[in-house]
Image (spheres, rainbow, N blue to C red):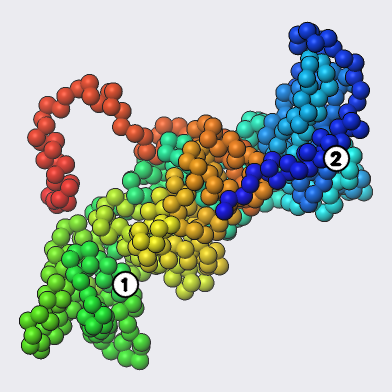
Amino acid sequence: MSKKPATLQLEPKVKAVAAAAPQLEPKVESVPADAAPNADNIAFVLLSENQRIGRVVSVAGSQSVVLMEESADNKAVIPAGLMMGTIVKIPLPETVVYGLVVGLSVPIPATEPGAPEMKVMEVELIGESVRGDDGSLSPFRRGVSMSPPLTSAVFTTSQNDLRLVFLRPDIATARIGSLHQERRLPALIGVDDLLGKHFAVVGATGSGKSCSVTVILRAILDHYPNAHMIVMDPHNEYAHALGDRAEVIGSGTLQLPYWLFNFEEICEVLVQAGAKLELAEAALFSEYIANAKRQFLGASAEGRYITADTPSPYRITLVTQYIDETMGRLEKPESLVPYHRLKAAINLITNDGRFSFMFGSGITVRDNMAGILSRILRLPVDGKPVTILDLSAVPSEILNVSVSVLCRLLFDFGVWSDGAVPILLVCEEAHRYAPEDDKAGFGPAKRALSRIAKEGRKYGLSLCVATQRPAELAAGMLSQCNTIFTMRLSHQRDQELVRAALSDAAIGLLEALPTLGNAEAIAVGQGIAVPMRMVFTELPPEQRPKSASAIFSSAWKNDIANGEDFVQEVVDRWRRVRR
Protein backbone atom coordinates (compact mmCIF):
# COMPACT_ATOMS: atom_id res chain seq x y z
CA MET A 1 0.00 0.00 0.00
CA SER A 2 1.37 3.39 -0.94
CA LYS A 3 1.93 6.21 1.51
CA LYS A 4 -0.38 9.17 1.47
CA PRO A 5 1.04 12.51 0.48
CA ALA A 6 2.29 14.64 3.32
CA THR A 7 -0.47 17.17 2.68
CA LEU A 8 -3.05 14.53 3.56
CA GLN A 9 -1.14 13.45 6.63
CA LEU A 10 -1.12 17.02 7.95
CA GLU A 11 -4.69 17.86 6.92
CA PRO A 12 -6.18 17.53 10.45
CA LYS A 13 -3.54 19.94 11.79
CA VAL A 14 -4.27 22.42 9.01
CA LYS A 15 -7.97 22.24 9.88
CA ALA A 16 -7.13 22.82 13.52
CA VAL A 17 -5.16 25.91 12.56
CA ALA A 18 -8.06 27.11 10.45
CA ALA A 19 -10.47 26.59 13.34
CA ALA A 20 -8.33 28.89 15.44
CA ALA A 21 -8.30 31.51 12.71
CA PRO A 22 -10.01 34.33 14.68
CA GLN A 23 -7.23 34.26 17.26
CA LEU A 24 -4.44 33.94 14.73
CA GLU A 25 -5.38 36.45 12.02
CA PRO A 26 -4.52 40.12 12.38
CA LYS A 27 -7.33 42.56 11.83
CA VAL A 28 -7.20 44.49 8.60
CA GLU A 29 -9.25 47.22 7.06
CA SER A 30 -11.87 46.02 4.63
CA VAL A 31 -11.69 46.78 0.94
CA PRO A 32 -14.81 47.58 -1.11
CA ALA A 33 -16.25 44.49 -2.77
CA ASP A 34 -16.02 46.03 -6.20
CA ALA A 35 -12.35 46.89 -5.86
CA ALA A 36 -10.25 45.02 -8.43
CA PRO A 37 -7.02 43.39 -7.32
CA ASN A 38 -4.13 45.72 -7.97
CA ALA A 39 -0.82 46.81 -6.55
CA ASP A 40 -2.64 48.85 -3.91
CA ASN A 41 -4.31 45.93 -2.14
CA ILE A 42 -2.09 42.92 -3.03
CA ALA A 43 1.66 42.74 -2.48
CA PHE A 44 3.47 40.35 -4.83
CA VAL A 45 6.61 39.61 -2.86
CA LEU A 46 9.68 37.81 -4.15
CA LEU A 47 11.30 36.07 -1.23
CA SER A 48 14.57 37.59 -0.13
CA GLU A 49 17.24 35.99 2.02
CA ASN A 50 16.49 35.65 5.73
CA GLN A 51 12.96 37.00 5.30
CA ARG A 52 10.51 36.07 8.05
CA ILE A 53 7.55 34.28 6.48
CA GLY A 54 5.60 32.85 9.40
CA ARG A 55 5.53 31.08 12.74
CA VAL A 56 5.12 27.48 13.88
CA VAL A 57 1.57 26.70 15.04
CA SER A 58 1.67 22.91 15.09
CA VAL A 59 4.38 20.29 15.67
CA ALA A 60 3.99 16.53 15.30
CA GLY A 61 7.18 14.48 15.11
CA SER A 62 9.16 15.64 12.11
CA GLN A 63 6.26 17.60 10.64
CA SER A 64 5.28 21.18 11.40
CA VAL A 65 2.55 23.54 10.26
CA VAL A 66 3.54 27.16 9.72
CA LEU A 67 1.04 30.01 9.63
CA MET A 68 2.32 32.47 7.05
CA GLU A 69 2.21 36.11 8.03
CA GLU A 70 0.59 39.16 6.49
CA SER A 71 2.60 42.18 5.48
CA ALA A 72 3.17 44.99 7.94
CA ASP A 73 0.56 47.20 6.25
CA ASN A 74 -2.08 44.47 6.34
CA LYS A 75 -1.95 43.75 2.63
CA ALA A 76 -2.32 40.16 1.46
CA VAL A 77 1.13 38.79 0.73
CA ILE A 78 1.67 36.44 -2.22
CA PRO A 79 5.11 34.87 -1.68
CA ALA A 80 6.04 34.27 -5.32
CA GLY A 81 9.41 32.76 -4.43
CA LEU A 82 7.98 30.06 -2.18
CA MET A 83 7.29 26.68 -3.77
CA MET A 84 7.25 22.97 -3.09
CA GLY A 85 10.74 21.79 -2.25
CA THR A 86 11.95 25.15 -0.91
CA ILE A 87 14.24 24.95 2.11
CA VAL A 88 13.27 27.12 5.11
CA LYS A 89 14.94 27.56 8.48
CA ILE A 90 13.86 27.90 12.09
CA PRO A 91 16.55 29.54 14.27
CA LEU A 92 16.63 28.23 17.84
CA PRO A 93 18.96 29.19 20.71
CA GLU A 94 21.25 26.17 20.27
CA THR A 95 20.57 25.05 16.69
CA VAL A 96 19.19 26.13 13.36
CA VAL A 97 16.58 23.66 12.16
CA TYR A 98 16.03 23.28 8.41
CA GLY A 99 12.83 22.10 6.84
CA LEU A 100 11.51 21.17 3.41
CA VAL A 101 8.27 22.74 2.19
CA VAL A 102 5.97 19.80 1.33
CA GLY A 103 2.61 21.57 1.26
CA LEU A 104 1.08 24.99 0.62
CA SER A 105 -2.58 25.82 1.13
CA VAL A 106 -5.08 28.59 1.83
CA PRO A 107 -7.61 26.95 4.19
CA ILE A 108 -9.51 30.26 4.65
CA PRO A 109 -9.40 32.17 1.36
CA ALA A 110 -10.42 35.80 1.14
CA THR A 111 -14.02 36.35 0.08
CA GLU A 112 -13.37 39.81 -1.33
CA PRO A 113 -10.35 41.66 -2.70
CA GLY A 114 -8.04 42.91 -0.01
CA ALA A 115 -9.68 40.92 2.78
CA PRO A 116 -7.39 38.89 5.03
CA GLU A 117 -6.88 35.21 4.30
CA MET A 118 -5.04 32.42 5.99
CA LYS A 119 -2.06 30.86 4.23
CA VAL A 120 -0.53 27.70 5.67
CA MET A 121 2.77 26.02 4.88
CA GLU A 122 3.52 22.40 5.75
CA VAL A 123 7.17 21.67 6.55
CA GLU A 124 9.06 18.41 6.95
CA LEU A 125 12.00 18.89 9.34
CA ILE A 126 15.07 17.38 7.68
CA GLY A 127 18.11 18.36 9.72
CA GLU A 128 19.98 20.94 11.73
CA SER A 129 23.22 22.79 12.33
CA VAL A 130 24.42 23.22 15.91
CA ARG A 131 25.57 26.64 17.11
CA GLY A 132 29.07 26.83 18.49
CA ASP A 133 30.15 28.97 21.44
CA ASP A 134 31.28 31.65 19.00
CA GLY A 135 27.98 31.58 17.14
CA SER A 136 29.31 29.64 14.15
CA LEU A 137 27.28 26.76 12.74
CA SER A 138 28.49 23.18 12.55
CA PRO A 139 28.16 21.19 9.29
CA PHE A 140 24.59 20.22 8.45
CA ARG A 141 23.44 16.85 9.74
CA ARG A 142 20.34 14.78 9.12
CA GLY A 143 17.79 14.51 11.90
CA VAL A 144 16.58 17.01 14.47
CA SER A 145 17.66 16.77 18.12
CA MET A 146 15.03 19.27 19.32
CA SER A 147 11.73 20.09 17.64
CA PRO A 148 10.97 23.81 17.34
CA PRO A 149 8.56 25.09 20.00
CA LEU A 150 5.25 26.70 19.08
CA THR A 151 5.38 30.28 17.76
CA SER A 152 9.00 29.81 16.60
CA ALA A 153 9.75 32.18 13.74
CA VAL A 154 10.31 30.67 10.28
CA PHE A 155 12.64 32.35 7.76
CA THR A 156 13.74 31.91 4.19
CA THR A 157 17.25 30.59 3.69
CA SER A 158 20.27 32.51 2.46
CA GLN A 159 22.88 31.35 -0.04
CA ASN A 160 25.13 30.43 2.88
CA ASP A 161 22.34 28.34 4.40
CA LEU A 162 21.80 26.44 1.15
CA ARG A 163 25.51 25.83 0.79
CA LEU A 164 25.61 24.53 4.34
CA VAL A 165 22.74 22.13 3.62
CA PHE A 166 23.59 20.92 0.12
CA LEU A 167 27.38 21.09 -0.06
CA ARG A 168 29.21 18.36 1.83
CA PRO A 169 32.90 19.24 2.20
CA ASP A 170 33.52 16.56 4.81
CA ILE A 171 32.91 13.59 2.45
CA ALA A 172 33.82 12.50 -1.08
CA THR A 173 31.30 14.01 -3.50
CA ALA A 174 30.72 14.37 -7.23
CA ARG A 175 28.56 16.88 -9.08
CA ILE A 176 25.76 15.47 -11.24
CA GLY A 177 23.66 18.59 -11.87
CA SER A 178 22.08 21.64 -10.28
CA LEU A 179 19.26 22.38 -7.86
CA HIS A 180 15.97 23.13 -9.58
CA GLN A 181 15.15 26.13 -7.41
CA GLU A 182 18.69 27.52 -7.41
CA ARG A 183 20.62 26.66 -10.56
CA ARG A 184 23.77 28.29 -9.20
CA LEU A 185 24.11 25.57 -6.57
CA PRO A 186 25.38 22.12 -7.58
CA ALA A 187 23.51 18.88 -6.94
CA LEU A 188 26.07 16.57 -5.33
CA ILE A 189 26.16 12.88 -4.57
CA GLY A 190 28.07 11.38 -1.67
CA VAL A 191 30.05 8.70 -3.50
CA ASP A 192 30.46 6.24 -0.63
CA ASP A 193 26.87 6.58 0.60
CA LEU A 194 25.51 6.29 -2.95
CA LEU A 195 27.51 3.21 -3.90
CA GLY A 196 27.73 1.56 -0.49
CA LYS A 197 23.95 1.22 -0.16
CA HIS A 198 22.75 0.84 -3.78
CA PHE A 199 20.80 3.36 -5.85
CA ALA A 200 18.07 3.42 -8.47
CA VAL A 201 17.20 5.62 -11.44
CA VAL A 202 13.58 5.30 -12.53
CA GLY A 203 11.73 7.22 -15.20
CA ALA A 204 9.40 6.83 -18.15
CA THR A 205 10.77 6.26 -21.63
CA GLY A 206 12.02 9.56 -23.01
CA SER A 207 12.53 11.22 -19.62
CA GLY A 208 16.33 11.02 -19.88
CA LYS A 209 16.92 7.97 -17.67
CA SER A 210 19.84 6.53 -19.65
CA CYS A 211 21.47 9.95 -19.92
CA SER A 212 21.12 10.42 -16.16
CA VAL A 213 22.77 7.06 -15.47
CA THR A 214 25.60 8.14 -17.79
CA VAL A 215 25.96 11.47 -15.96
CA ILE A 216 26.29 9.67 -12.62
CA LEU A 217 28.85 7.19 -13.94
CA ARG A 218 30.95 9.84 -15.68
CA ALA A 219 30.86 12.11 -12.60
CA ILE A 220 32.23 9.30 -10.44
CA LEU A 221 34.84 8.31 -13.04
CA ASP A 222 36.08 11.91 -13.23
CA HIS A 223 37.22 11.55 -9.62
CA TYR A 224 38.03 7.84 -9.53
CA PRO A 225 39.55 6.65 -12.83
CA ASN A 226 40.46 3.27 -11.28
CA ALA A 227 36.89 2.34 -10.48
CA HIS A 228 35.38 -1.01 -11.45
CA MET A 229 31.99 -0.71 -13.13
CA ILE A 230 29.98 -3.28 -15.07
CA VAL A 231 27.03 -2.19 -17.20
CA MET A 232 24.53 -4.82 -18.34
CA ASP A 233 23.38 -3.16 -21.54
CA PRO A 234 20.50 -4.96 -23.31
CA HIS A 235 20.30 -2.49 -26.23
CA ASN A 236 23.94 -1.51 -26.83
CA GLU A 237 23.32 2.10 -25.71
CA TYR A 238 26.24 2.85 -23.44
CA ALA A 239 29.25 2.12 -25.67
CA HIS A 240 28.74 5.48 -27.38
CA ALA A 241 28.15 7.26 -24.07
CA LEU A 242 31.25 6.07 -22.20
CA GLY A 243 33.63 6.00 -25.16
CA ASP A 244 37.26 5.16 -24.45
CA ARG A 245 36.55 4.69 -20.76
CA ALA A 246 34.82 1.39 -21.47
CA GLU A 247 35.72 -2.08 -22.68
CA VAL A 248 32.78 -3.36 -24.73
CA ILE A 249 32.20 -7.11 -24.56
CA GLY A 250 29.63 -8.16 -27.12
CA SER A 251 29.16 -10.13 -30.30
CA GLY A 252 32.37 -11.97 -31.13
CA THR A 253 34.13 -11.04 -27.87
CA LEU A 254 31.76 -12.29 -25.18
CA GLN A 255 33.03 -15.41 -23.41
CA LEU A 256 30.78 -17.21 -20.97
CA PRO A 257 31.73 -20.91 -21.13
CA TYR A 258 28.97 -23.42 -20.51
CA TRP A 259 30.92 -24.96 -17.64
CA LEU A 260 30.51 -21.71 -15.65
CA PHE A 261 26.73 -22.32 -15.65
CA ASN A 262 25.42 -24.11 -12.58
CA PHE A 263 23.10 -27.08 -12.98
CA GLU A 264 19.87 -25.10 -12.87
CA GLU A 265 21.17 -22.65 -15.47
CA ILE A 266 22.46 -25.24 -17.95
CA CYS A 267 19.19 -27.15 -17.62
CA GLU A 268 17.27 -23.98 -18.53
CA VAL A 269 19.44 -23.53 -21.63
CA LEU A 270 18.68 -27.10 -22.71
CA VAL A 271 14.97 -26.75 -21.95
CA GLN A 272 14.87 -23.69 -24.20
CA ALA A 273 16.52 -25.86 -26.87
CA GLY A 274 13.80 -28.52 -26.62
CA ALA A 275 14.93 -30.86 -23.84
CA LYS A 276 12.51 -32.01 -21.16
CA LEU A 277 14.03 -33.45 -18.01
CA GLU A 278 11.96 -35.31 -15.50
CA LEU A 279 13.22 -35.80 -11.96
CA ALA A 280 15.00 -39.10 -12.64
CA GLU A 281 16.66 -37.89 -15.85
CA ALA A 282 17.71 -34.62 -14.17
CA ALA A 283 19.38 -36.55 -11.33
CA LEU A 284 21.34 -38.63 -13.84
CA PHE A 285 22.28 -35.57 -15.90
CA SER A 286 23.60 -33.87 -12.75
CA GLU A 287 25.76 -36.92 -12.02
CA TYR A 288 27.02 -36.95 -15.63
CA ILE A 289 28.24 -33.37 -15.31
CA ALA A 290 29.88 -34.00 -11.91
CA ASN A 291 31.69 -37.06 -13.28
CA ALA A 292 32.83 -35.13 -16.36
CA LYS A 293 34.29 -32.44 -14.10
CA ARG A 294 36.10 -35.03 -11.98
CA GLN A 295 37.59 -36.61 -15.08
CA PHE A 296 38.76 -33.22 -16.41
CA LEU A 297 40.40 -32.35 -13.08
CA GLY A 298 42.07 -35.78 -12.83
CA ALA A 299 44.27 -36.24 -9.78
CA SER A 300 43.53 -32.73 -8.52
CA ALA A 301 39.93 -33.80 -7.88
CA GLU A 302 41.03 -36.22 -5.17
CA GLY A 303 39.57 -35.28 -1.81
CA ARG A 304 37.44 -32.49 -3.29
CA TYR A 305 33.64 -32.34 -3.21
CA ILE A 306 32.73 -31.91 -6.88
CA THR A 307 29.13 -31.32 -7.94
CA ALA A 308 27.36 -30.13 -11.06
CA ASP A 309 27.46 -26.61 -9.57
CA THR A 310 31.24 -26.50 -9.04
CA PRO A 311 32.69 -23.81 -11.39
CA SER A 312 35.13 -26.21 -13.00
CA PRO A 313 35.61 -27.09 -16.69
CA TYR A 314 34.32 -30.29 -18.27
CA ARG A 315 33.85 -31.62 -21.79
CA ILE A 316 30.27 -31.60 -23.03
CA THR A 317 31.18 -34.44 -25.42
CA LEU A 318 31.91 -36.64 -22.42
CA VAL A 319 28.41 -35.90 -21.10
CA THR A 320 26.88 -37.07 -24.38
CA GLN A 321 28.93 -40.25 -24.11
CA TYR A 322 27.43 -40.91 -20.67
CA ILE A 323 23.96 -40.35 -22.17
CA ASP A 324 24.69 -42.89 -24.93
CA GLU A 325 25.86 -45.42 -22.35
CA THR A 326 22.68 -44.97 -20.33
CA MET A 327 20.51 -45.33 -23.44
CA GLY A 328 22.34 -48.57 -24.28
CA ARG A 329 21.28 -50.09 -20.96
CA LEU A 330 17.60 -49.21 -21.36
CA GLU A 331 15.26 -51.77 -22.90
CA LYS A 332 11.93 -49.97 -23.29
CA PRO A 333 11.82 -47.59 -26.29
CA GLU A 334 9.56 -45.09 -24.49
CA SER A 335 12.16 -44.66 -21.75
CA LEU A 336 14.69 -43.47 -24.35
CA VAL A 337 12.64 -40.39 -25.37
CA PRO A 338 13.93 -37.96 -22.66
CA TYR A 339 17.54 -38.90 -23.42
CA HIS A 340 17.03 -38.48 -27.15
CA ARG A 341 15.62 -35.00 -26.48
CA LEU A 342 18.49 -34.14 -24.14
CA LYS A 343 21.13 -35.25 -26.61
CA ALA A 344 19.38 -33.46 -29.48
CA ALA A 345 19.26 -30.24 -27.43
CA ILE A 346 22.98 -30.48 -26.64
CA ASN A 347 23.80 -31.02 -30.29
CA LEU A 348 21.56 -28.11 -31.28
CA ILE A 349 23.16 -25.49 -29.05
CA THR A 350 26.74 -26.69 -29.58
CA ASN A 351 26.32 -26.32 -33.35
CA ASP A 352 24.35 -23.04 -33.24
CA GLY A 353 26.60 -20.04 -33.99
CA ARG A 354 24.52 -17.86 -31.69
CA PHE A 355 25.79 -19.90 -28.73
CA SER A 356 29.45 -19.61 -29.67
CA PHE A 357 30.05 -17.40 -26.61
CA MET A 358 29.28 -20.53 -24.54
CA PHE A 359 30.96 -23.27 -26.57
CA GLY A 360 33.71 -21.49 -28.50
CA SER A 361 35.27 -23.81 -31.05
CA GLY A 362 33.52 -26.77 -29.45
CA ILE A 363 36.76 -28.78 -29.29
CA THR A 364 39.24 -27.24 -26.85
CA VAL A 365 38.22 -26.84 -23.22
CA ARG A 366 40.58 -25.03 -20.87
CA ASP A 367 40.34 -23.50 -17.44
CA ASN A 368 40.34 -19.78 -18.25
CA MET A 369 37.99 -18.68 -15.47
CA ALA A 370 40.54 -16.26 -14.00
CA GLY A 371 41.09 -14.60 -17.38
CA ILE A 372 37.34 -14.26 -18.05
CA LEU A 373 36.67 -12.71 -14.64
CA SER A 374 39.71 -10.42 -14.89
CA ARG A 375 38.40 -9.02 -18.16
CA ILE A 376 34.85 -8.52 -16.89
CA LEU A 377 36.03 -6.97 -13.62
CA ARG A 378 38.67 -4.78 -15.32
CA LEU A 379 41.62 -6.15 -13.34
CA PRO A 380 43.82 -4.33 -14.09
CA VAL A 381 41.84 -1.25 -15.13
CA ASP A 382 44.34 -0.28 -17.83
CA GLY A 383 42.61 3.02 -18.55
CA LYS A 384 39.16 1.48 -19.05
CA PRO A 385 37.33 1.23 -15.71
CA VAL A 386 33.97 0.25 -17.25
CA THR A 387 32.94 -3.08 -18.75
CA ILE A 388 29.90 -2.85 -21.01
CA LEU A 389 28.29 -6.24 -21.45
CA ASP A 390 26.41 -5.93 -24.74
CA LEU A 391 23.57 -8.36 -24.02
CA SER A 392 22.06 -7.72 -27.44
CA ALA A 393 24.58 -10.33 -28.63
CA VAL A 394 22.98 -13.01 -26.42
CA PRO A 395 20.09 -15.10 -27.84
CA SER A 396 16.86 -13.77 -26.40
CA GLU A 397 15.73 -17.20 -25.17
CA ILE A 398 18.69 -17.47 -22.79
CA LEU A 399 19.24 -13.79 -22.01
CA ASN A 400 17.93 -14.12 -18.47
CA VAL A 401 20.04 -17.25 -17.95
CA SER A 402 23.17 -15.35 -18.97
CA VAL A 403 22.27 -12.53 -16.58
CA SER A 404 21.84 -15.11 -13.83
CA VAL A 405 25.34 -16.49 -14.50
CA LEU A 406 26.93 -13.03 -14.53
CA CYS A 407 25.23 -11.83 -11.35
CA ARG A 408 25.98 -15.07 -9.51
CA LEU A 409 29.65 -14.98 -10.52
CA LEU A 410 29.99 -11.35 -9.39
CA PHE A 411 28.44 -12.10 -6.03
CA ASP A 412 30.55 -15.22 -5.47
CA PHE A 413 33.69 -13.30 -6.44
CA GLY A 414 32.82 -10.64 -3.87
CA VAL A 415 32.31 -13.31 -1.21
CA TRP A 416 35.52 -15.25 -1.90
CA SER A 417 37.63 -12.09 -2.30
CA ASP A 418 36.23 -10.64 0.97
CA GLY A 419 35.14 -7.52 -0.93
CA ALA A 420 38.73 -6.55 -1.75
CA VAL A 421 37.64 -5.04 -5.11
CA PRO A 422 34.51 -2.87 -4.80
CA ILE A 423 32.37 -3.23 -7.94
CA LEU A 424 29.37 -1.28 -9.26
CA LEU A 425 26.88 -3.34 -11.28
CA VAL A 426 24.52 -1.26 -13.42
CA CYS A 427 21.42 -3.24 -14.34
CA GLU A 428 19.61 -1.47 -17.17
CA GLU A 429 15.96 -2.51 -17.60
CA ALA A 430 16.12 -4.37 -14.30
CA HIS A 431 12.41 -5.26 -14.46
CA ARG A 432 13.23 -7.73 -17.25
CA TYR A 433 15.51 -9.82 -15.03
CA ALA A 434 13.80 -9.37 -11.67
CA PRO A 435 10.09 -9.06 -12.51
CA GLU A 436 7.30 -8.74 -9.98
CA ASP A 437 5.40 -11.58 -11.65
CA ASP A 438 6.78 -14.88 -10.34
CA LYS A 439 5.77 -16.61 -13.56
CA ALA A 440 7.80 -14.21 -15.70
CA GLY A 441 11.55 -14.15 -16.21
CA PHE A 442 13.98 -16.75 -14.87
CA GLY A 443 13.89 -17.56 -11.17
CA PRO A 444 17.66 -17.89 -10.58
CA ALA A 445 18.31 -14.52 -12.29
CA LYS A 446 15.76 -12.88 -10.03
CA ARG A 447 17.28 -14.53 -6.96
CA ALA A 448 20.82 -13.55 -7.98
CA LEU A 449 19.88 -9.87 -8.37
CA SER A 450 17.86 -9.91 -5.16
CA ARG A 451 20.81 -11.43 -3.32
CA ILE A 452 23.08 -8.65 -4.56
CA ALA A 453 20.48 -6.09 -3.47
CA LYS A 454 20.19 -7.61 0.02
CA GLU A 455 23.74 -8.73 0.78
CA GLY A 456 26.03 -7.33 -1.91
CA ARG A 457 27.20 -4.27 0.02
CA LYS A 458 28.76 -6.57 2.64
CA TYR A 459 31.14 -7.80 -0.05
CA GLY A 460 31.84 -4.56 -1.88
CA LEU A 461 29.21 -5.12 -4.56
CA SER A 462 27.03 -2.10 -5.33
CA LEU A 463 23.90 -2.16 -7.49
CA CYS A 464 22.38 0.48 -9.73
CA VAL A 465 18.82 -0.39 -10.71
CA ALA A 466 17.57 1.42 -13.82
CA THR A 467 14.01 0.86 -15.01
CA GLN A 468 11.14 2.66 -16.72
CA ARG A 469 8.51 0.45 -15.07
CA PRO A 470 9.18 0.25 -11.31
CA ALA A 471 5.75 -1.33 -10.79
CA GLU A 472 6.94 -4.38 -12.75
CA LEU A 473 10.10 -4.73 -10.65
CA ALA A 474 10.31 -7.45 -8.02
CA ALA A 475 9.04 -6.41 -4.62
CA GLY A 476 11.87 -5.34 -2.36
CA MET A 477 14.37 -4.46 -5.10
CA LEU A 478 13.54 -0.76 -5.02
CA SER A 479 13.31 -0.66 -1.23
CA GLN A 480 16.88 -2.02 -1.01
CA CYS A 481 18.12 1.07 -2.88
CA ASN A 482 18.84 3.74 -0.28
CA THR A 483 19.10 6.49 -2.89
CA ILE A 484 16.48 6.94 -5.61
CA PHE A 485 16.45 9.36 -8.54
CA THR A 486 12.86 9.53 -9.77
CA MET A 487 12.31 11.11 -13.17
CA ARG A 488 9.03 11.71 -14.96
CA LEU A 489 6.53 8.92 -14.35
CA SER A 490 3.05 8.98 -15.85
CA HIS A 491 1.63 5.60 -14.83
CA GLN A 492 -0.27 5.67 -11.55
CA ARG A 493 1.04 2.27 -10.39
CA ASP A 494 4.64 3.36 -10.96
CA GLN A 495 4.08 6.53 -8.96
CA GLU A 496 2.48 4.62 -6.09
CA LEU A 497 5.35 2.14 -5.90
CA VAL A 498 7.94 4.92 -5.82
CA ARG A 499 5.98 6.73 -3.10
CA ALA A 500 5.95 3.56 -1.02
CA ALA A 501 9.75 3.32 -1.25
CA LEU A 502 10.49 6.93 -0.29
CA SER A 503 10.54 8.76 3.02
CA ASP A 504 7.78 11.14 4.07
CA ALA A 505 10.07 14.10 3.41
CA ALA A 506 9.95 13.47 -0.33
CA ILE A 507 6.27 12.59 -0.69
CA GLY A 508 5.22 16.19 -1.24
CA LEU A 509 7.85 16.61 -3.96
CA LEU A 510 6.49 13.59 -5.84
CA GLU A 511 3.31 15.43 -6.75
CA ALA A 512 5.39 16.96 -9.56
CA LEU A 513 6.38 13.60 -11.08
CA PRO A 514 4.02 13.68 -14.09
CA THR A 515 5.17 17.19 -15.03
CA LEU A 516 8.94 16.88 -14.63
CA GLY A 517 10.90 17.95 -17.69
CA ASN A 518 13.58 15.89 -19.40
CA ALA A 519 16.66 15.40 -17.20
CA GLU A 520 14.76 16.60 -14.10
CA ALA A 521 14.46 14.31 -11.10
CA ILE A 522 13.32 14.10 -7.51
CA ALA A 523 16.33 12.77 -5.60
CA VAL A 524 16.07 11.31 -2.13
CA GLY A 525 18.15 9.02 0.05
CA GLN A 526 21.45 8.69 1.84
CA GLY A 527 23.52 9.41 -1.25
CA ILE A 528 22.42 13.06 -1.24
CA ALA A 529 22.29 15.70 1.45
CA VAL A 530 18.52 16.25 1.59
CA PRO A 531 15.54 15.41 -0.65
CA MET A 532 15.64 17.75 -3.62
CA ARG A 533 14.32 18.48 -7.06
CA MET A 534 17.30 18.66 -9.37
CA VAL A 535 18.35 18.94 -13.02
CA PHE A 536 21.00 16.57 -14.34
CA THR A 537 23.99 17.99 -16.20
CA GLU A 538 23.33 18.14 -19.94
CA LEU A 539 25.61 15.81 -21.86
CA PRO A 540 27.16 16.79 -25.19
CA PRO A 541 25.90 14.70 -28.14
CA GLU A 542 29.05 12.55 -28.27
CA GLN A 543 28.50 11.41 -24.65
CA ARG A 544 24.82 10.50 -24.86
CA PRO A 545 23.59 6.91 -25.00
CA LYS A 546 22.17 5.74 -28.31
CA SER A 547 18.64 5.51 -26.99
CA ALA A 548 16.82 7.92 -29.29
CA SER A 549 13.76 6.74 -31.21
CA ALA A 550 13.86 6.30 -34.97
CA ILE A 551 13.31 9.56 -36.89
CA PHE A 552 10.69 8.50 -39.41
CA SER A 553 10.32 11.89 -41.06
CA SER A 554 13.93 11.93 -42.29
CA ALA A 555 14.41 8.19 -42.87
CA TRP A 556 11.40 8.03 -45.19
CA LYS A 557 12.59 10.83 -47.44
CA ASN A 558 15.23 8.70 -49.17
CA ASP A 559 15.01 5.31 -50.86
CA ILE A 560 17.50 2.45 -50.36
CA ALA A 561 18.98 1.77 -53.78
CA ASN A 562 20.54 -1.64 -53.08
CA GLY A 563 17.68 -2.98 -51.04
CA GLU A 564 18.44 -6.69 -51.43
CA ASP A 565 22.10 -6.24 -50.48
CA PHE A 566 21.06 -4.30 -47.40
CA VAL A 567 18.57 -7.02 -46.40
CA GLN A 568 21.25 -9.70 -46.99
CA GLU A 569 23.56 -7.94 -44.54
CA VAL A 570 20.77 -7.89 -41.98
CA VAL A 571 20.06 -11.59 -42.58
CA ASP A 572 23.75 -12.40 -42.11
CA ARG A 573 23.81 -10.63 -38.78
CA TRP A 574 20.53 -12.30 -37.92
CA ARG A 575 22.02 -15.72 -38.52
CA ARG A 576 25.31 -14.73 -36.94
CA VAL A 577 27.16 -15.72 -40.12
CA ARG A 578 30.93 -15.53 -39.55
CA ARG A 579 32.90 -14.34 -42.56
Q: Secondary structure at mark 1?
A: helix
Crowding around mark 2 (Cα neighbors within 10 Å: few <14, some 14 to 19, many 20+) is many
Identified at 87% across, 36% down, the residue is 20
Identified at 75% across, 29% down, the residue is 106
Amino acid type at image mark 1: Glu
Task: Select label 1 or label 2 by which is in front.
Answer: 2
| Residue 327 sits in quarter | bottom left
342 left or right, relative to 387: left
- Residue 147 in percent (x, y) is at 84, 49
* Residue 570 appears in the figure: yes
In this rendering, the answer to whether 417 lies above or below 98 is below
Identified at 76% across, 18% down, the residue is 44
The residue at which mark 2 appears reads as 57
- Residue 23 in percent (x, y) is at 91, 33
In this rendering, the answer to whether 571 lies above or below 232 is above
Q: Secondary structure at mark 2?
A: strand
- Residue 83 in percent (x, y) is at 69, 31
Identified at 42% across, 43% down, the residue is 242
* Residue 426 appears in the figure: no
The residue at which mark 1 appears reads as 264
Q: How many angstroms separate mark 1 from mark 2 (CA)?
A: 62 Å
In-front residue for pair 441/493: 493
195 left or right, relative to 399: right
329 left or right, relative to 296: left
Label drawn at residue 133: none
In-front residue for pair 318/207: 207
Q: How many marks on residues?
A: 2
Crowding around mark 1 (Cα neighbors within 10 Å: few <14, some 14 to 19, many 20+) is some
- Residue 470 in percent (x, y) is at 47, 49
